[in-house]
Amino acid sequence: MSDPQHKPAPKLRPLPAFIFMSRWLQLPLYLGLILAQCVYVFHFWVELKDLIGAALGNEAALAHIFQAIAVPNAVVPTKLNETTIMLVVLGLIDVVMISNLLIMVIIGGYETFVSRMHLDTHPDQPEWLSHVNASVLKTKLAMAIVGISSIHLLKTFINAAFYDAKTLIAQTAIHVVFLLSALAIAYTDRITTGTQNESQNH
């Protein structure tokens, strides 16, 4: 006897089936983002290798680090110091946060717009994936962008003496805009979710 709760999916007509299959055109985009993730992993290890090499006295690694964190009009130090280490570590954190952003886009976007992954029983399923939808994904991406912007702003403030007031104000204003945008997206999502819950209760 067949289970009434597991009815076979109705067969789509050819045109709707073709249109629905078009979602697989996004698959190469997500595969491309995976390749971009590989580039970030390689970049992370290159920067980390240079930091360790500079700490051990490697002059080539030290020169590469100073070139990577070069600030206009700044005096190039002759040895590794606390500020330089902090800037390199902030750069590594920046890479990690962008990598996390890529993971959210790849997994959340594929799950939402392409096909289910059926990870419900997987022990490593991300907590946020169980209730992900397009609205939740936008909110999480907005907050991740705010975090990345915070890292860049902190790097600017560390070298604030070498920037003019207009640059500092502009970067701060941009960060505030990102923050307000994320709050607006979250508030809009909250209103939409509340409206949907009210309509379902009635």
Image (cartoon, rainbow, N blue to C red):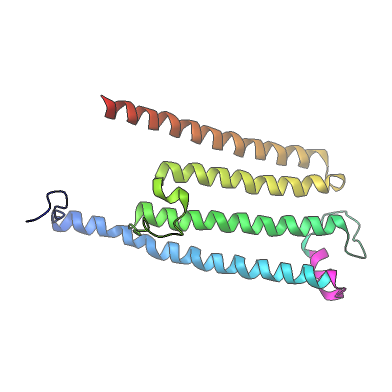
Quadrant of the image for the C terminus?
top left
- Is 146 left, or right, of 2 in this rendering? right
Q: Which residue is depicted at the point 90% across and 61% down?
A: 76
- Is 168 left, or right, of 20 in this rendering? right
Nearer to me, 130 or 175 = 130
Q: Which residue is depicted at the point 64% across and 49% down?
A: 148
Q: In this view, which residue lies farthest toward the left?
A: 1
Magenta: main secondary structure = helix
Question: Does the magenta run of residues contain 66?
Answer: yes
Q: Which residue is depicted at the point 14% across and 52% down?
A: 7
- Is 89 left, or right, of 60 in this rendering? left
Task: In the rendered view, tell whether residue 22 sits above or below residue 146.
Answer: below
How many dots with numbers?
0
Question: Does the magenta run of residues contain 191?
Answer: no
Task: Specify start and end residues of the magenta stretch as a single range.
Answer: 55-67
Quadrant of the image for the N terminus?
bottom left
x and y percentages locating residue 5 in the rendered image: 16, 49
x and y percentages locating residue 177 in the rendered image: 62, 36
Q: Which residue is depicted at the point 71% across and 42% down?
A: 171
x and y percentages locating residue 129 in the rendered image: 43, 51
Q: Quadrant of residue 13?
A: bottom left
x and y percentages locating residue 61 in the rendered image: 81, 72
Task: In the rendered view, tell whether residue 7 sits above or below residue 190.
Answer: below
